[in-house]
Image: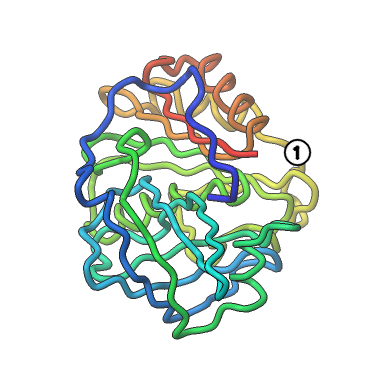
Amino acid sequence: MTEGFVPPTRFAVPGRIAVSNRAAALWQTATLTEIRRETPQASTFRFAVPGWAGHLPGQHLMLRLTADDGYAAQRHYSIASPPDDAGHIELTLDHVEGGEVSGWFHTVAKPGDEVEVRGPLSGFFAWPGDRPALLIGAGSGVVPLMSMVRHHRARDLSVPLRLLVSARGPEELIYAREYGAETTPVFTRRAPEGVPVGRLTASQVAPLLTDTERPPGGWEAYVCGSNAFAEHASRLLVAAGQPVDRIRIERFG
C-alpha cells in the first residue's frame, strides 16, 4: 500500500480474523535481497525475514527506516507475497513524490540493506482462502489483492476468485505479467487497440453478481485503492446487489 494508510470505510465488515498481538509487537530485521521493477513508478522489494511468523493474504505490516543520525520514519505497507513464501516477504511500493520512505527505497536502497518490520497487522482485510473472493483494486491498491491471487494459485484452491484491476494504462499495470484468466484489467486513460478506455463501470461489475456468475453463498468483496476509487467501486457493488456487510475496504490518499 502507498504511504498514508487510512482505516476502512463504513462499508467495512465488522468481523475480523484474529491477529497475534505478541508477534505483531515485535520488531524484526528485514534484509533486502532483490528489487524488481514493476512499472515506471512502482517496484517490488523482496526481504529475508527469518523470524517472520507468517501472514494471511491481505494483511499489512509496519516498516521502520532509521537514518544514521537516529531519525526514524514508519509506514504501513501491504504485503504482496503469499503466506507460503516462508522466511521472506515482498512489498510493492510506488515512488511517491516527496515521500521520504518510498523515495529512499526507489533511489538509495540496494540488496543487503536492512530495515525493521513489525507484523502482520489487521485481520480485517485478510482472506484465508475459504470463501469466494471478488477483488477490485486500482493502482497500488492491487498489492494486497495480489497476495490473495498468489495464495489462490500456490494452494491450487478451487474456491472462485475474480480480480478487476484498474490502471491508467498498460504500462502502469502493476504485476501485468502475472495476471491470468481470473483478471480483468480496466484502463482509465490509455488502452490497447480495441479495448475501451474509462473508469470502472457497472457493466464490468454487475455481471459478476448475476445468478450465473455469482457462486453459491455469494462473494466476499475486497476493495482497495484511493479514497475516490474505493467509494466508487463500493457503490457499484451495492447497486449490483452485493450485501454491504460483505464488502471490505482498504483505502489511502
Q: Residue furthest front?
A: 69
The residue at 42%/28% (across/down) is 248
Q: How is the image coloured?
A: rainbow
- Residue 83 placed where, x, y %? 26, 58
Q: Is residue 76 above or below residue 70?
A: above
Q: Amino acid at mark 1?
A: Gly
Q: Quadrant of the image for the C terminus?
A: top right
Across and down, in percent, residue 97 comes to: 75, 57
Of 113 and 183, nearer the camera is 113
**Corner quadrant of residue 40:** bottom right
Q: Please tell me which residue lies in front, 92 or 196.
A: 92
Dot 1 corresponds to which residue?
198
Please provide percent x and percent y for residue 206.
53, 24
**Up-down: is 125 above or below 185?**
above
For the point 69% across and 64% down, which residue is it?
41
**Relative to the observer, which residue lies in front, 15 or 186?**
15
Q: Measured along the vertical axis of the image, is residue 31 above or below residue 218?
A: below
Circle 1 packing at 10 Å, graded few (<14), some (14-19), many (20+), is some
- Residue at 66%, 29% (x, y): give it: 201
Above or below, 244 against 103 in this view is: above
